[in-house]
Image (spheres, rainbow, N blue to C red):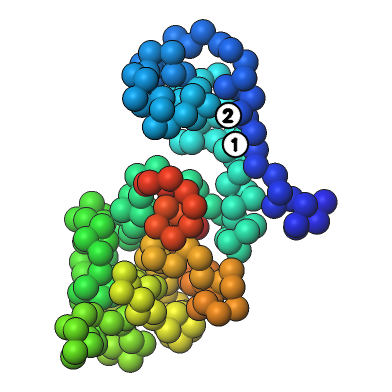
């Protein structure tokens, strides 16, 4: 099966639709029991079909924490689509992805270079991991006062000051549209044998149109977090960890 044909598959969606049509008597969460106990206002807002598909991790419907069936296949298709070796679906936004990324890459007392204006989820990841931040300064727009993307030269300056760092972490795209030169930063990080971690929460659409920047994954980033709910069509809190 070729790429286009594979990407037409929607295993998790199809499994949810099938379960909703089975007319089960649910003794599982959520308490609205596939819409049977929902207030009519909620049903009018969400739709009966959406409520029927709102289920927990019941038998044969897979487990997002240990996927083996529909979710596993859906994540494999997502990885192929975004150009990742492996992709995980996240339900707590890119915040949990950024925290997991730092926890996976760093041990307590290890140093990491990252922009001072990085999202607070990365700051939380530092606390959870016990890693030591070495903050890089970012330029800013003098007219608006908005921080721009960190530059390769600043990352290299910090690297020279702190030669024992274990990783570089950057914001790929800011909420205001400033994009880092991920290719240059990636090449420099790898020249120092360091992984590049990218918070690309505001760039999940990159790489899908020639008029947009290339994705961090395609430019050599080692671990990337993207918010599928911010600029793609997923529901709130849906994110991706590659």
Q: Which residue is under mark 1? A: 13
- Image coordinates of residue 239 in percent, x first then y, are 43, 51
Crowd class of label 2 (few under 14; some 14 to 19; many from 20; radius 10 Å): some
Q: SS class of the residue under badge 1?
A: helix
Crowd class of label 1 (few under 14; some 14 to 19; many from 20; radius 10 Å): few
- Whether residue 90 is situated above or below residue 205 in the rendered picture: above
Corner quadrant of residue 113: bottom left
Residue 29 visible in the current orientation? no
Q: SS class of the residue under badge 2?
A: helix
Q: Which residue is under mark 2? A: 16
- In the drawing, does residue 212 fall left or right of residue 102? right
- In the drawing, does residue 139 fall left or right of residue 205? left
Residue lying at 55% horizontally and 19% vertically, measured from the top left = 59
Residue lying at 70% horizontally and 44% vertically, measured from the top left = 9
- In the drawing, does residue 3 fall left or right of residue 102? right
Residue lying at 21% horizontally and 60% vertically, measured from the top left = 120
Which one is nearer the viewer's eye here, 10 or 85? Answer: 10
- In the drawing, does residue 51 fall left or right of residue 123? right
- Find residue 212 and name its label: none
Q: Of all residues shown, which one is farthest toward the right?
A: 1
Which one is nearer the viewer's eye here, 128 or 12? Answer: 12
Corner quadrant of residue 3: bottom right
- Image coordinates of residue 79 in percent, x first then y, are 59, 55
Residue lying at 51% horizontally and 8% vertically, measured from the top left = 25
The reply to whether the C-beta atoms of the residues labelled 2 and 1 are less than 8 Å apart is: yes
């Amino acid at each position: 099966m070729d790429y286009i044909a594979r990407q037409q598959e929607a295993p998790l969606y199809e499994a949810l639709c099938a379960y909703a049509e089975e007319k089960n008597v649910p003794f599982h969460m959520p308490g609205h029991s596939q819409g049977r106990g929902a207030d009519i206002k909620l049903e009018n807002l969400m739709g009966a079909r959406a409520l029927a598909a709102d289920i927990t991790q019941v038998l044969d419907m897979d487990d997002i924490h240990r996927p083996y069936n529909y979710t596993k296949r859906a994540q494999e298709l997502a990885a192929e689509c975004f150009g990742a070796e492996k992709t995980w679906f996240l339900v707590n936004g890119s915040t949990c992805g950024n925290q997991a990324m730092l926890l996976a890459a760093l041990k307590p007392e290890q140093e990491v270079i990252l922009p001072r204006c990085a999202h607070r989820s990365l700051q939380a990841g530092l606390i959870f991991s016990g890693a030591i931040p070495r903050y890089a300064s970012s330029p800013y727009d003098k007219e608006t006062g908005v921080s721009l993307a960190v530059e390769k030269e600043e990352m290299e300056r910090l690297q020279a000051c702190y030669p024992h760092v274990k990783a570089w972490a950057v914001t790929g795209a800011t909420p205001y549209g400033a994009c880092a030169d991920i290719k240059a930063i990636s090449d420099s990080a790898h020249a120092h044998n360091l992984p590049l971690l990218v918070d690309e929460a505001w760039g999940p659409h990159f790489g899908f149109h020639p008029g947009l920047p290339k994705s961090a994954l395609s430019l050599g980033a080692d671990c990337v977090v993207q918010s599928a709910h911010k600029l793609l069509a997923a529901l709130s809190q849906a994110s991706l960890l590659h």
